[in-house]
Image (cartoon, grey):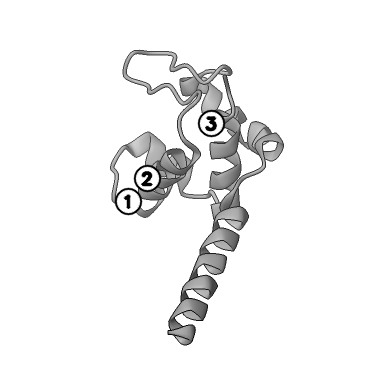
Amino acid sequence: MKKQILALLAATALTVSANAVAAGDAAKGKAKAAACAACHGNDGIGKMPTYPNLKGQKEAYLTKQMKAFKDGTRKDPTMNAMAKPLSDADMANISAYFSGMK
């Protein structure tokens, strides 16, 4: 029983620290998101009805979508090309920037 509790505590600690590392830096994201503004706007509101609004979206959702565009599981020629050069840190930072918009 004691070993199970210790294993559960260790798993919880790893999950918490992994989430802390995954959190992005909105200031760095703002600089990186300059390229996103052409379609998604400086204010995170899509310039055309077919471009999604990114302002206020959940950070994890935005990161998940960028990763899907990068690895090709989500298809859009423009977004696949835009996401391809992004690192995990870039995606986390961009996500933090847009999710922090109110």
* Percent x, y of residue 76: 31, 37
- Left or right, residue 72 beside residue 6: left
First reached walking from the N terminus: tag 3 or tag 1: 1
Amino acid identity at mark 1: Gly
Query: Vertically, is 43 above or below 15?
Result: above
Quarter of the image that includes the N terminus: bottom left
> Would you say the residues marked 1 and 2 are in contact, meaning their CB atoms lie under 8 Å apart?
yes
Residue at 60%, 51% (x, y): give it: 89
Residue denoted by label 1: 72
* Percent x, y of residue 50: 31, 19
Residue at 43%, 81% (x, y): give it: 4
Outermost residue toward the top in this view? 48
First reached walking from the N terminus: tag 3 or tag 2: 2
- Left or right, residue 14 beside residue 60: right
Query: For this rendering, which residue is in front, 68 or 99?
Result: 99
Cα distance between the residues tagged 3 and 1: 23 Å
Query: For this rendering, which residue is in front, 81 or 8?
Result: 8
Amino acid identity at mark 3: Ser
Outermost residue toward the right in this view? 27
- Left or right, residue 2 beside residue 73: right
Residue at 50%, 23% (x, y): give it: 55
Residue at 41%, 40% (x, y): give it: 61
Residue denoted by label 3: 99
Cα distance between the residues tagged 1 and 2: 5 Å
- Which mark identifies residue 69? 2
Query: Vertically, is 29 above or below 89?
Result: above
Amino acid identity at mark 2: Phe
Instruction: State which mark lies toward you, 3 or 1.
Output: 3
